[in-house]
Amino acid sequence: MPDLLIELFSEEIPARMQKRASEDLKSLVTNGLVEAGLTYASAGAFATPRRLALSVEGLLAASPTTVEERKGPRVDAPEKALDGFLRGAGVTKDDLEIRDEKKGQVYVAKITKPGRPAAEIVAEVLENAIRTFPWPKAMRWGNGNLKWVRPLHSIVCLLSSEEGAEVVPLEIDGITAGNTVWGHRFMSKGAFKVSGFDDYVTKLKQNFVVLDPNERADHIWHDATTQAFAQGLDVVDDKGLLAEVAGLVEWPVVLMGNIDDAFLGLPPEVLQTSMKEHQKFFSVRNPKTGRIEKFVTVANRETADNGVTILAGNQKVLSARLSDAKFFWENDVRTVEREGLEAMGAPLVNVTFHNKLGSQSERIARIAALAREIAPIVGADADEAELAAKVAKADLSSEMVYEFPELQGIMGRYYAKKAGLSDAIADACRDHYSPLGPSDDVPTAPVSVAVALADKLDTLTGFWAIDEKPTGSKDPFALRRAALGVIRLVLVNDVRSPLMRIVMPLIAEFERLEHDKISHEERDYEEQVANYCGVTIEQLTEYRIQSGKVITAESDSEKWEAAMDRIFGGVDWSQIGLPGETTSRDLLAFFHDRLKVFLKDEGIRHDVIDACLAMPGNDDITLLVKRARALSETLATEDGKNLIQGFKRANNILTQAEEKDGVEYSFGPDIKFAESDAEKALFAALDTAEAAIKPAMEIEDFAAAMSAMAAMRPAVDGFFEAVQVNADNDILRRNRLNLLGRIRDICLKVADLTKLEG
């Protein structure tokens, strides 16, 4: 079985595209080979700045011959139908067989497709892959029509086996495939020929090219950390930067340089960000002081002076960059020390957050008011939480954050300390954006928690109020991330508060503000409608939201009173909820959906959460999760599983009996009508469970409540094994059904077990 080697050699491929490109090459080629009948043992894809390479081992030498049977028309079908079948199958009438079927005799064609040599198939597959390659951006050059990320110079396409190596005949836009490879742009000894993948990798290294990006990354990290360790320093870990730098060089040479003393006083995050974003340098930290004192750069070649000239040039450019950063820092600090942090954020009054939600300044005022309200719930000082919210986004107006947006929050902490604010406020400035993702740390300091929750809840309620919700995969305002952030903040900090109590007034206020924007004529019209219906403007607005009806003067083509009766006739205004209630419940459902995704990683099933959502207090996320975790743990036990089956059996019998009899069996059974020991044992088990469940539920000890519920399992099983519920005696039957009703009532106090699947 031959092995296949492919190399596509071009000008420099952007580092961010290399990994995806190598994966695309592998999938396009291997999928094409398999579809053509060529299976293989293994495949590996590689990328350097100037080449994509693919190795396929254990490839079939030729595709197998296949025979396909294709059923044609009936023997008595019109001649035209037969002619069409013959053309499609590529056979003559003499090649057909006649077979008997239920509906009569039919023609059957056997179509033999002979196998093809691997070289022929590889050439077709590779040409198609190159011409249809899914680059994010591609270009044309010269007079050809081929598009590639950068000008493509050569193609290596080689089939090798024990008998030798064969170049696959292939020519694309004047580029003919061969076995000639070019090494490093500057250090290579020249072009060389290869006979297979192992030979290819070996000769590339001899010509100063490391093919495997993981090997290049490991080499960079090893040399960088070794040099830093020798000087008692640490390299700041940055996997994203390491992968990017590994994609910029074919022969990595690690060099460590010095940062001018004039810049060592800058915050370490400023140094790290500036060096990473502008120069692709790794930061080297002194573990004793936490200061960034040196940098690591990675050259793409060895030099006679061991990189001295390269380092000198890099240090010169770095000094210019850091001079800018120092200027921004000093200007910002002067502003804060002279005018205060709130003054730094004053320009945000002219920055629009969203055209329907006002400016950043208006948003900050809302967050501050909300943070003050949340503060007692999370154990924070209300004044401190409000002040922290007022200054948390002030750094958005700073010169430093304007230059490096990724430093928002981080710089806010430094500026808060320069302004003489407390550590709690400074930490809130830094942490209120968190958590930004599922792996991000969750703030636990009370003031930080208050501001972080206020920030995210303002975002969610605002966009829900203006009906800008996520749809499908689109979430331009990162509302899913905000909801998950709220959930994690609540759970990690054991926050106990009904969400509806917080979000309903916010959404109602947003809706009121939106209503205030309408013209005087429209407002007068709404007041007329509300007066005619005998309701408030708030009720009318809520009705419009619930019903989805747009009520305008233009829509009333008939007599006004008749139009009002047509639109509002039969509306039960007592059922119209409070202002903001409909939208708030929709937002709560969104939180519940996010919670299901979050708890999935814990192994908690969706139906378990649904069983808990059906209970009171489902807008208290902490309470809801405690109940769901306890139910999930109960279902993992043998008693829990069997009790659920017993509950479902009882519920099914009850549902059928209540439907048949037209009564509800929940009036309390009497033990004096119990005939068997199993029946009496169930009475005792229910008394014991109820006595334990009621106090456990009052103190929200769901684990104890569910354990008590699961303990009923032997008595429930014994009852169903020994007792006939639908007895001939009506008194016994009613008593036993009421006994089942008691099982149902006790279980439903813990969770709505009817929601459980299976």
Image (cartoon, grey):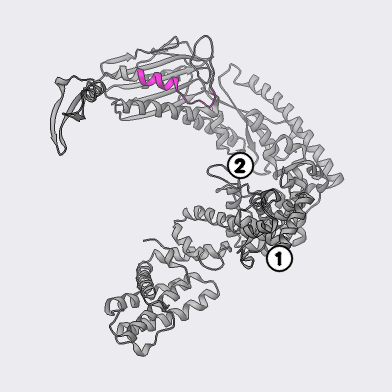
Which numbered marker is on residue 476? 2
In this rendering, the answer to whether 267 lies above or below 29 is below
Question: SS of the residue at dot 1?
Answer: loop
* Residue 602 image offset from top left, x and y in percent: 47, 56
Residue 28 falls in which quadrant of the image? top left
Q: Is residue 303 left or right of residue 660?
A: right
- Which residue extends farthest right? 338
Please state which of residues 739 and 431 is positioned toward the viewer in this rendering.
739
Q: Residue at x 74, y 26 (%)?
A: 320
Q: Reply yes or no: does residue 233 show up in magenta.
A: no
Q: Reply yes or no: does residue 136 show up in magenta.
A: yes
Please state which of residues 671 and 586 is positioned toward the viewer in this rendering.
586
Task: Assign the N terminus to one quadrant of the image.
Answer: top left
* Residue 55 image offset from top left, x and y in percent: 37, 25
Residue 308 falls in which quadrant of the image? top right
How crowded pointer 2 is (Cα within 10 Å; few <14, some 14-19, many 20+) is rated as: few
* Residue 317 image offset from top left, x and y in percent: 70, 24
- Find the magenta span and give its range: 123-137
Q: Is residue 236 visible?
A: yes
Task: Assign the C terminus to one quadrant of the image.
Answer: bottom left
- The residue at which mark 1 appears reads as 534
Mark 1: which amino acid? Gly
Q: Is residue 264 visible?
A: no
| CA gap, disc 1 and disc 2 | 41 Å
- Which residue extends farthest bottom? 672
